Amino acid sequence: MTETEKMPETEEDLEPVSGWQMFYDDPSMLLFLGIASPTILYTLWGVIEVLHVPLAGY
Amino acid sequence: MATIMATLRNPQDFTTCPDTGLNINKPVANLVKIHILTAVMMLLAGGILGLGVALTRWPAVHLLPSEWFYIFLTGHGAAVLLFWVHIFSVGIAYFFVTTPINARLATPKIAWLSYWLMLIGAAIATVMVLLGQATVMFSAYPPLKAHPLFYLGVILFAVGALVPAFLVLATLVKAKNERTFKGSMPLTTFGVLIWAIIAIFTWVMGAVIMIPTWLWSMGLIANIDPQLYRVIFWALAHSTQQMNIVLHITIWYTLAAVLFGARPLNEKVSRTAFVLYLFALQLGSVHHLLSDPGTSFTWRTFNTSYAAYLAVLGSLIHGLTVPGGIELAQRRRGLTHGLFEWLRKAPWDNPIFSGFFLSLILFGFIGGISGVTMSNQQINMTVHNTFYVPAHFHGTVATGTTLAFIAFSYWIVPLVTRRKLAYPGLAKMSTWIFGLGMGTFALFGMAAGHLGVPRRHWDITYADAALPFDFSAMAHMIMTVAEIGAVIGGFGALFYIISILSTLLGGKVLAKGALPALAEPAGLVAARMHGGTEPQHKGLEVPGSLVLCMVLLVFLIVYYFAQYKYLATIWGIS
């Protein structure tokens, strides 16, 4: 098989792909959401809460 | 499902294993070898340091003076929790992102650069710890301050470990462009994609907190807020261990395919479980901060008692589909008698299987259940900063991840070296001894934690303390059993190290037959690794696995509510 030869079509190529499957097959979307989710829900939220703790007066 | 190109695009870049039919990218084979060799050396160093820690916390032995104890404890944490698991992980990540899809690794030279960065960083940090210049323990909480070179070593290691995550993404792009596969990628490759994404979050968080701390150690920044440090540090440190979990579960699926020709019961459901990990596992980092001031109950509870339970759901899915896939394969082979003939007649004398299945059981019953329980805000108060905490994470990192890595080594090292496994007798014993030893340590350590034995204190007799406290004889006895378990587990690790180092450095090279006998002929193994098809099950075909999962679930529920009973006993309201 040469570099330019295309992968042969199969019956599965004609099957409809569900939305969930398309989502799972999209590394870019997984990357974005996988970084955004803990960054917002854990890190940013936690840091904002700590920064709002008033400093003790000396 | 994945469709893998049957014919290699660039066959000169691959070697085909005669035992399995798998095509291995040549640069990947070398990278796997060097990463496993280095990681095992780190495990050896970490194990020796851990032995010193165990023999000191064994009350009757109490080996090391306090200064050396904390040096050993810091070194053990860094060598095992960072260097061993992550160097090993990077090596096998290269395998998982290439072999199942017949892909070539993107930019192997950058992979080597990453290796050297990790090695140099690990060496610098370890030397500083051993010189007594960085006795800050694994968490390195300010205001404890280490020598700047320690932080520099950690930063170099983190950068080195971040690069492979991008190489995984780049390799997927390259594979897509070269059309080595189409459709969904195989589950094992999907697992390593999730690992890579978590790795990017993890090591970036590491940079966010370690670079300012490094500047602080040099006096260039006046102050590091301890609470801010703790919040961001655990985004790094907790997630480093979640990366391990994703990879060791990828290993479970792989070894089930290799040993039994098993496919996941439903690949889409297993994929969903990995995605649940991606979104929710890191949020469990809050369980390190449940007793800390400065953050709201809402933040803590949302992340640990709601979001992180989605990750628990993911674990429960894997806990059913991995043994379920094996059971289905075994039953189709005729092992249909009763609930557990498929398991009874599994190859328990093969260290690849025994290590893998012990990892699955011990991780679920010890590491998983204790982790879920201590992530509850109220229950956490009963075990916070006690010996329960290291017992828990030995249940995850030692009996879960390390045991899976040990089992996987016995398969992948002969695969990439074509060398027959050296000292197979030691290998057979290693998984049992390590699993049962570390399992004992974890179980008894949790019991000691319930009795209030502190997590990090060098001496639980509190000799010379201004405010003395006497632990009961029961606490001393339980700590003794726990540490005996740790020492026994150490022997298991030593047997593994001897076997794998001997294989890597001097094993007998064989043209064929380097790998143990497989359940499936060559070629079929490759086909299994390349992914499943549609759901394999029809109705209740895996009753044994379902019973195992129900036992786990009932145990979890009983244990969880027993902790509430325990909480009520500690702080009675009158």
Image (cartoon, grey):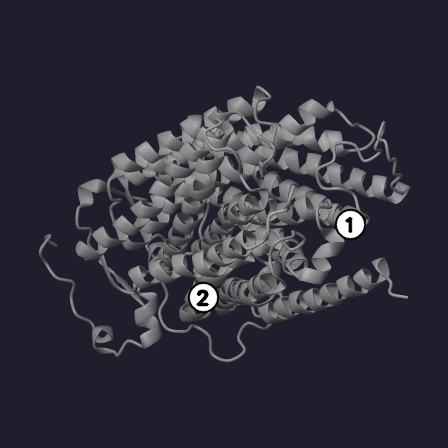
Mark 2: few/some/many CA within 10 Å (<14, 14-19, 20+): many
Q: Chain of mark 2?
A: B
Residue B527, horizontal then vertical, whole percent: 33, 59
Q: Amino acid at mark 2?
A: Ser
The residues bearing labels 1 and 2 have C-alpha atoms spaced at a distance of 34 Å
Q: Is residue B423 visible?
A: no
Q: Is residue A40 above or below residue B511?
A: below
How many labels sit on residues? Answer: 2
In the image: residue B550, left or right of residue B3: right
The quarter of the image holding the N terminus of chain B is: bottom left
Camera-nearest residue between B372 and B51:
B372
Element at badge 2?
helix
Numbered tag placed on residue B241 in the rendering: none
Residue B135, horizontal then vertical, whole percent: 61, 28
**Residue assigned mark 2:** B270
**Residue assigned mark 1:** B447
Q: Is residue B335 above or below residue B189?
A: below
The quarter of the image holding the C terminus of chain B is: bottom right
